[in-house]
Image (spheres, rainbow, N blue to C red):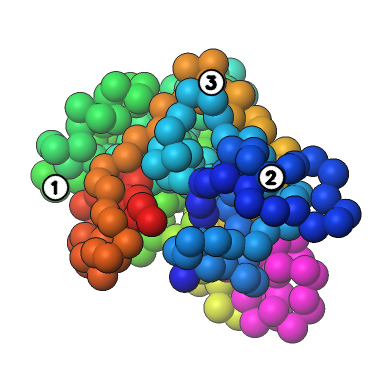
Amino acid sequence: MGCELSGVVTSVGAGVQRFRAGDLVYTRVAKDRLGAFAETACVHEDLVAIKPASLDFVHAAAAPLAALTALQGLRDELLVKPGMRIFIPGGAGGVGTFAIQLARHFGASVATTASTRGRPLVERLGAEVIVDYTSESFVKVLKDYDGAFDLVGGTTLARAFSVVRRGGAVVSIAGLPEPTTAMKDMGGSIGLAVLFWFLSAPIRLRALIAGVRYRYLFMHPGARDLETIGALVDAKKLEVVVDKVFPFAEIREAFAYLEQGRAKGKVVVTM
């Protein structure tokens, strides 16, 4: 178990060129390997970057998965540019805290949903319109946004199409995969593309009716994007928000806390 980590390189393979023992690094480990909840992990050098100098190991470990997801969803799929209006439901969560900041960095204005408890956080990170999902429906407040980055799924994803203008896009990490997911993010499997075509038919029909492009995103790990994130962090343009830290002996409690769905930012386990 475990998708991301930060730590010190203890040894390198004979063909490794970019790192040496003693380097301080962070990484989103390979999807087919995982294993970050361990004292040591073996990771290909193409997935590893030098840890941002301004972060301690706890905050560095909190960055890769969520920051890569936010960066790739906004930059590569929603193509966020200055002047755009982007809706990011669930802005106080792990991915949301990065997504709000990155959307603002790209020049967009941001609307999000948050509880009363989460409002000060998303305000500080740059959200300009905040809808309290416990008392108000965002469909009554938002209209004609250029795109939505759905981090919640379910009814939130279904209703997001009604607040995005025709010609806009909805990108989700919590909905149903569609054929592009299989072809672009999962190795070009025709079988999976066909399966996802059937599974995603209702949501793609909803998108067609709304005149909106729908895309499900599987984040892909990589050193280059981690270097981009690290540069933004060290330039004080990207804050890493950590909600709570657990020692490894309390990893069961860490998961139980995370599964409540109320974490503001990331939950980290220390060895």
- Residue 231: percent from left, percent from top: 61, 24
Measured as percent of width and height from the top left, residue 4 is found at: 51, 54
Q: Is residue 155 magenta?
A: no
Residue 48 vertical placement versus 238 (above, below): below
The residue depicted at 32 percent of the width and 50 percent of the height is 267
At horizontal 38% and vertical 56% (from top left) the residue drawn is 271
Q: Secondary structure at mark 3?
A: helix
Q: Check disc 3 and give the amino acid type.
A: Asp
The CA span between labels 2 and 3 is 23 Å
Give percent across and percent down for residue 6. 52, 46
Q: Is 178 within the magenta? A: yes
Residue most toward the right? 15
Q: Earlier in the sequence, mark 3 or mark 1?
A: 1
What element does badge 1 sit on? Answer: loop
**Quarter of the figure with residue 37:** bottom left
In front: 144, or 57? Answer: 57
**Contact between labelled residues 1 and 2, with CB atoms less than 8 Å apart:** no
Q: Amino acid at mark 2?
A: Ala
- Looking at the rendered structure, the kind of residue marked 1 is Thr
Residue placed under numbered mark 1 in the picture: 134
Q: Whole-Å distance between the Cαs marked 3 and 1?
A: 35 Å
Location of residue 230 with respect to 66 vertically, above or below: above
Q: Earlier in the sequence, mark 2 or mark 3?
A: 2
Identify the residue at image location x=47%, y=64%: 38
Which residue sits at x=54%, y=16%? 235
The residue indicated by pointer 2 is: 21
Residue 217, placed above or below residue 32: above
Residue 132 can be seen in this image:
no
Magenta residues span: 177-197
Kindly report the secondary structure that dominates the magenta region of the rendered protein: helix
**How far across and down, in percent of the image, does residue 2 sit?**
47, 64
Residue on which the image places disc 3: 234
